[in-house]
Amino acid sequence: MGAGARRTAARLVPVLALLATLFVLPTTSRATAPQQEAGVSALFFGDSLMNGTGSRPTRPVMARVAARSLGWNVTVDAFGGTGYTTGGKKGRPYLDRLREPGLLSSRYDVVLLEGGTNDREADVATMHARTTETVQYVRQRLPGARVVLMGAFDPHGRRSDPRRKGIDAVIRTVAREQGVPFFSPMSGGWTRGQGARFLCPDGLHPSTYGYGVMGARLTAALKQIPGLDEDVRTARPGRP
């Protein structure tokens, strides 16, 4: 093995080792990551990307990697094909899903709304309105929680769609208007420099390895949000 190959293998060891510890957990579209004592309580809400579609076996790998790395208690509610403006073939748009009785009844410190990838056919005005309504609804229901927006994903391959760039920009605009943190796999270059092993055979969703990389990127993005930990500690005494 050459020096370059050894360096690549060394970089992959932490991600692969962490992934190996995740597969003793049950597979569901609404799953809870390993619980940490007195940790931050978070809801990671989204589409098939957050659900882990494409990994084998299918699990919310990205969320679990982030939960373990951050030491957070994370609940995942994710359904493929859905978005702010679409419910896909079998689901419902985000706002309808969030209005499901009991979904926002827990005392979450952080609510991460991931999406936009499936909204590529929406016009700008509709996308802006639906995203704004969704953020405002979460804030109304959970005034003590910190809302975070995670933008669209694009695989930069045969399933790439340039319309996602515009959708991603709309989510960024809403985040700025609503004063909430925003980061994006697409505009943030989360797939940059990744080879064929990053995606599963459908050419759209990450592979198990790819989700491990995404989980590391997600962890880094959440750590970079100014004042997030301080805001959570301040909000806890008076949260509903």
Image (cartoon, rainbow, N blue to C red):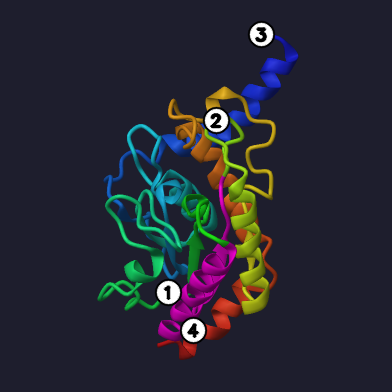
Q: Which residues are magenta?
A: 124-153
Task: Looking at the image, tell me whether mark 3 or mark 2 is earlier in sequence order.
Answer: 3
Q: Verify CB contact (< 8 Å) between mark 3 and mark 2.
A: no
Circle 4: element type: loop
Please tell me how crowded label 4 is: few (under 14), some (14-19), or many (20+) other residues with Cα within 10 Å: many
Q: Could you tell me which residue is drawn at 38 percent across and 40 percent down?
A: 53
Task: Looking at the image, tell me whether mark 1 or mark 4 is earlier in sequence order.
Answer: 1
Labelled disc at residue 120:
none
Please tell me how crowded label 3 is: few (under 14), some (14-19), or many (20+) other residues with Cα within 10 Å: few
Task: Looking at the image, tell me whether mark 4 or mark 2 is earlier in sequence order.
Answer: 4
Kindly identify which residue carries mark 1. 108
Residue extending furthest top?
Answer: 1
Residue 199 image offset from top left, x and y in percent:
51, 30
Labelled disc at residue 1:
3
Task: Looking at the image, tell me whether mark 3 or mark 1 is earlier in sequence order.
Answer: 3
Q: Amino acid at mark 1?
A: Tyr
